[in-house]
Image: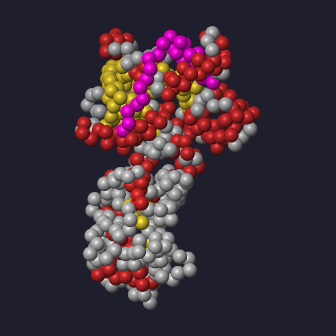
């Protein structure tokens, strides 16, 4: 049964912080504390919500972790799953379809102990016909790190960015005693835990924080995915070439449907768990159609509102600004539309640029915000999202054809490569327009495409301001502020500092001073990385 809106908000808040106070939960859900308390008790009593504590011995003591696949007689499947779930060394057990009847997550201090469990204990049980074992080489993140609203945990962020996990301090007897006390009641006040263990409360708090930060201990608020609207949970394995494994893990970690991700031994090197709102199979998208380039003449100035299909990128109505990709809800749109563009330097391209300059068009391109299209995983995994991106904004960023800029549904390498070509053409158009006297202003479009408000949407300028060269492919560009009373296409504050370069100026250079020496009145923007062109 699906949860009500109030119960869902409460469950999501508890998954993020199982020990959150009732006051904090009330603030998160918008309900009063009494309602929150009653709802939490009801969810626990009817079995919808359960709390648990897991000691990650692989991090704390170097234990082995193995993924087990068991085949059983049909009448023994449920009994075997319950028997595995009751073991102290089992963190997870489930009945599944496919090649295995039961899967489990089991820990062992060494290979000999693991061998004894598999052969002497599990293999000898009545009804078990086969046991397959995959030793976990690396645990990137677990179900604790999955968030129904897509919020990225520290462990998932490190997986997306390919960063190593923090070092874990060994656990002593006091640490294990604290874990055992919390296993009885995850939400127990630390004052009670300290009193029961006869230690100071600040000691309990300090040790608990250390274990949680070092991934030696996990506190969980578990709820079945079906209650959150996910019809099925799947387990999958992938065989990936060693050279491609790091890239594959980063891509998988950025998918919000992934609940857990492992590197394992055996025929498959990657194992994961994911949730899905539907069990239906989505048909593959048809390949993009590249339309032939037409060579009709551009729209004459007398009919500015008649768009030409062969126009250069950014062919707007007279006097309007153009922005790439706005309003595009399909991932195929950038590939199809931009492939219809005229080639840079062609007569159609040049006539379009000259027409816009003569009409006094202002280009207000939000260049940097679309960098996310070139590397969606990196934009999604920025470290500031967890602390500074509000839940409402994060929900808006998720793939949704009804939300502006949230077009990352089924986003993959093909789309990112297509956006590289989009950038090449768009940057070339802005550069030619600027060099011919066109007016270009600075836009950031923050608040969209994983760019929260109050965060800069510029690239490359930070390195230049510190006296270093910007990263390869980032070329600082400076556009002049415009006088509001001027009818000139471009009226810079200093006519000599930002005049269009002469015809002899090489591509990629500008007569404007470098970004490092620019004053506060001269905004600096930088292009997305591209090896084929520079914006100015």
Numbered marks: total:
0
Image quadrant holding the C terminus, namely bottom left
User: Viewer-proximal residue, 342 or 113?
Assistant: 342
Q: Position of residue 473 (x, y in %)?
A: 32, 57
> Is residue 296 shown left or right of residue 160?
left
Give the residue drawn at x 38%, y 22%: 65
Q: Position of residue 284 (x, y in %)?
A: 35, 53
User: Viewer-proximal residue, 137 or 371?
Assistant: 371
Q: Is residue 9 above or below residue 403?
A: above
Give the residue drawn at x 54%, y 17%: 179
Q: Quadrant of residue 234?
A: top left
Give the residue drawn at x 49%, y 54%: 456
User: Viewer-proximal residue, 132 or 60?
Assistant: 60
Q: Is residue 515 magenta?
A: no
Image quadrant holding the N terminus, namely top right
Q: Position of residue 329 (x, y in %)?
A: 46, 61
Instruction: Tell me if residue 323 can be seen.
Output: no
Q: Position of residue 166 (x, y in %)?
A: 42, 29
Q: Which residues are magenta?
A: 162-187
Instruction: Tell me if residue 210 can be seen.
Output: yes
Q: Is residue 458 above or below residue 303?
A: above
């Amino acid at each position: 049964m699906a949860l009500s809106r109030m119960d869902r908000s409460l469950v999501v808040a508890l998954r993020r912080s199982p020990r959150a106070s009732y006051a904090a939960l009330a603030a998160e859900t918008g309900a009063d504390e009494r309602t929150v308390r009653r709802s939490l008790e009801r969810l626990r009593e009817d079995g919808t919500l359960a709390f648990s504590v897991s000691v990650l011995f692989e991090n704390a003591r170097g234990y082995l972790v193995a993924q087990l696949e068991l085949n059983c007689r049909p009448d023994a499947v449920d009994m075997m799953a319950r028997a595995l779930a009751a073991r102290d060394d089992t963190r997870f057990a489930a009945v599944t379809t496919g090649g295995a009847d039961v899967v489990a997550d089991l820990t062992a201090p060494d290979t000999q102990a693991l061998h004894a469990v598999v052969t002497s204990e599990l293999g000898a049980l009545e009804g078990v016909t086969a046991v397959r074992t995959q030793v976990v080489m690396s645990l990137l993140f677990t179900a604790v790190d999955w968030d129904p609203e897509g919020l990225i945990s520290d462990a998932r962020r490190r997986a997306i960015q390919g960063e190593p996990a923090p070092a874990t301090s060994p656990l002593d007897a006091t640490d294990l005693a604290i874990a055992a006390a919390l296993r009885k009641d995850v939400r127990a006040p630390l004052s009670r835990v300290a009193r029961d263990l006869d230690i100071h409360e600040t000691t309990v708090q300090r040790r608990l924080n250390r274990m949680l930060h070092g991934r030696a201990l996990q506190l969980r608020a578990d709820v079945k995915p079906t209650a959150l609207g996910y019809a099925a949970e799947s387990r999958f394995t992938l065989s990936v070439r060693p050279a491609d494994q790091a890239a594959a893990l980063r891509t998988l970690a950025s998918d919000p449907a992934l609940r857990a991700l492992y590197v394992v031994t055996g025929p498959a090197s990657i194992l994961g768990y994911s949730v899905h709102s539907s069990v239906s199979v989505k048909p593959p998208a048809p390949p993009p159609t590249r339309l032939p380039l037409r060579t009709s003449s551009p729209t004459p100035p007398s009919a500015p509102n008649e768009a030409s299909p062969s126009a250069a990128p950014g062919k707007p109505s007279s006097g309007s600004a153009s922005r790439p990709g706005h309003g595009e809800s399909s991932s195929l749109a950038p590939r199809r539309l931009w492939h219809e563009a005229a080639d840079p330097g062609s007569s159609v391209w040049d006539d379009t640029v000259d027409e816009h300059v003569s009409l006094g068009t202002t280009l207000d391109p939000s260049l940097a915000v679309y960098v996310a299209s070139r590397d969606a995983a990196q934009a999604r995994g920025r470290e500031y999202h967890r602390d500074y991106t509000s839940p409402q904004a994060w929900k808006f960023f998720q793939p949704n054809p009804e939300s502006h800029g949230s077009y990352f549904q089924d986003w993959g390498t093909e789309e990112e490569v297509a956006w590289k070509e989009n950038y090449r053409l768009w940057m070339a158009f802005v550069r030619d327009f600027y060099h011919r006297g066109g007016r270009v202003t600075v836009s950031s479009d923050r608040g969209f495409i994983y760019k929260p408000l109050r965060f800069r949407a510029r690239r490359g300028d930070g390195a230049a301001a510190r006296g270093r060269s910007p990263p390869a492919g980032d070329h600082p560009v400076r556009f002049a502020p415009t006088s509001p009373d001027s009818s000139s296409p471009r009226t810079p504050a200093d006519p000599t500092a930002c005049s269009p370069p002469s015809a002899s100026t090489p591509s990629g250079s500008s007569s404007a001073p470098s970004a490092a020496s620019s004053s506060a009145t001269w905004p600096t923007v930088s292009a997305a990385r591209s090896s084929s062109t520079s914006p100015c």
